[in-house]
Amino acid sequence: MSWPQFVTVTLNGLTLAALYFVVAIGFTLIFGVLRVVNLAHGSFYLLGGYVGWTVADRTGSWVLGAVAALVAAALGGLLLELGLLRRIHGQDLREALVTIGVSIVAADLMLAQWGGFTYDFSPPDAITGGVRLPLLGIGYPKYRLFVLAFALALGLALWLLLARTRLGIVVRAAIDDRDMVAAVGIDVQRLFALMFAVGAGLAGLAGVVGGSVLSISSGEDARYLLASLIVVIVGGMGSLPGTAVAALLVALVEQYSLALFPTYAAIVSFLLMVVVLVVRPQGLFGRPA
Amino acid sequence: MSTLEPRYSRRALLCRAGLVGLAASASALLAACAGQQPTPTPAPPATSPTPAAAATPTPAAPAAAASPTVTVGPAAGEIVIGILATLEGAFALYGEEAVRGVELAVAEFGGAIAGKKIRLVKESTDATPQVAREKARKLIEQDKVDCIVGPLSGDEGLALRDYAKTIPDKTIVNGTSAAQDTTLRDPAPNFFRFSTDGVQWMAGLGTYCYEVKGYRRVATLGEDYSYPYSQVAGFLLEFCRLGGECVAQFWVPIGTKDYSSVISSMPTDIDAIYVILGGSDAVNFLKAYSDFGGKAALIGGSSTVDQNVLETKGALRSRVIGIPGAGPVAADNPDPAWKAWVEQYRKQFPQGLSTPSLFCWGYYVNAKGLLLGLQAVNGDLSDGQKKLQAALAKVEFDGPTGHIKLDKNRQAIANNFVTEVAEGPDGNLYNKLVKVVEGVNQTLGLPEDKYLSLGSFTRDNPTCEKIKRTFGS
């Protein structure tokens, strides 16, 4: 592998990791606080992508589209939590099955609404086109660098939220022991609904941000659900730093293998997952049972 | 609140998450296992079930018990045709087009053959061979269809050819599945393909790229399964014989999202990249390629720049104009038969595409071939459909893209079209007709013995050198 190629592939890995992080962070938040394995997470990604594209197309503003995606997916998440999941809290298998069911219904509804077309976003001119990287001497698409910066900013904001605010303290406490949090008089149901909306909203936002790197079409929901599952299993379910590290690991492994041996790239990220599960079943940053 | 529930450990939850996550694939596996069992002869459900079926409950068995028995099997004076197409996932739009194709053909015959009403039963696959086989079995055994039109994708066709051998008294006509080996090697006597295959769809393109476009060195990029193998081989068969070079080949898993790293591995001293990817994957590649400032020209496979892809919503359009490709249809074909057919399509499906895609065409010609066969025997399906199958082998007709007839392997010989993406006066992108190649047979007119000596097409066969050695350049 030549030097410029190595740099490019590494950058590809980093930017894909950023995308995986944005999608998986919502998944892990929801699991961490609610203990719900939300298998409809990919649907929120796709819903965000479709709504975002439609709004961006009508208004001509990509940013408005991204905001609309965030809001639409957050509302969808709220609806799922309040309408269905609240009744069956604590019953893992039922929760998982209900979310699978919702994802199947949602996929068909979205297919009916937006058809099987592929949707291609047009981000603002300021972040499209190529840029020559200083020192490295290679060209790289600006948009991918934007995604990287966006994920870093999002990660930082989440960290500040969790580490420095009262809400963050409650969330961290709920991740550790939600019964105790309820016992000290905090309205846990409200917290659950809020975190579900935030997690789903982030997935919707990722639909626009990620949809602009690649494209949005029917079937993307399953792809990103799978990516999120691999990332959180490798990183440790419910762990935010774990999600960040695992997103990096999974994306870099995927990109290097696509560059080196594209034919077998599909199995490599699963191999990574298998190895992690064998050596450290709770995930890299997960706490042992 | 979950105070009554025991608090689950993370580890237990992890296991459960994994279990549930695997549930979907597990059911697919079960389906695949069920597909391997010997096919019981379809007996009426009222009579005693076979002991095997009672002992080992397959996923099909409970489904059969649960499904309402409203319309199972052909009523008197009715012919039931199953449509097998991919109506979900990344190929969903292709599946919609496929169903339109069959409906067009049925409407053309007034919905009946010799006074027998045609009833259609749709079944969706996910483009994998296991599910295609399972769904075909479901159509035959549960829905009791007489004939199947389908499937859509390459590997599915190979699976159905093998399945066809186990049901000799039913008939399968292809959809758009285009792996060459489906009919070239070890064909099934009751599998008919009135559409051309992936190799035939490339007829004329290699010559056009070498002689008119002046390309000499190319790389190829395709998804790693039977249909792209056929397409790449079809392109190289012409391109290499003229003296072209293929310097590198890349095969990526189906569903690869991010092509940026593959693009960075591409050699830079090439004139063009031959790309055969389907649906949204083609869009993702085109986008990444232009984002990364790719310099080489692009050459499209039959589905890379298909009408479905050209109607992508958004900024893609500027990137695809001028890409040459080839396939069994050309949007601006001046042939009056084509124009009439497009007119009919638009009338019947106002919500359809601006021009029918090759998937609509493939299912249409196959369904039409089948209906002509049924007409020839007056809808007589007795005697294990032997009469129908004999008649089908002789069916010849003028379709929207010219004359179609079958060879000894029940594979179509038909016209092919070299095209180039252009912008129409109404702003729609379409494949502009450049050249018609008439009467393309399965070996592209090359001597059959030499052609067969190349062996099955795979990811490393044939190479440019082997083609030059076999046929002389």
Image (cartoon, rainbow, N blue to C red):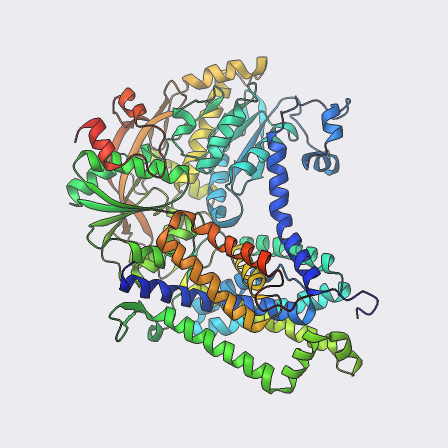
Place of residue B419 in the rendered image (x, y in percent of width and height, measured from the top left): 27, 42
Across and down, in percent, residue A211 comes to 45, 63
Locate the N terminus of chain B by quadrant: bottom right
Name the residue at the right extreme: B4
> Looking at the picture, does residue B354 appear above or below residue B153?
below
Taking the image as shown, residue B428 lies to the left or right of residue A174, namely left
Residue at the location (70% across, 37% down)? B63
Q: Residue furthest front?
A: A279
For the question of whether residue A200 can be seen, the reply is: no
Q: Looking at the image, which is closer to me, B165 or A80?
A: B165
**Count of numbered circles in the view:** 0
Where, by quadrant of the figure, is residue A230 drawn? bottom right
Towards the viewer: A130 or B124: A130
**Which quadrant is the C terminus of chain B positioned in?**
top left
Q: Position of residue A144 (x, y in %)?
A: 38, 68
Percent of width and height locating residue B145 = 60, 27
Residue at the image position 52 percent from the left and 59 percent from the top: A227
Foreground residue among A103 and B52: B52
Q: Is residue B405 above or below residue A285?
A: above
Residue A91 seen anywhere in this rendered image of the structure: yes
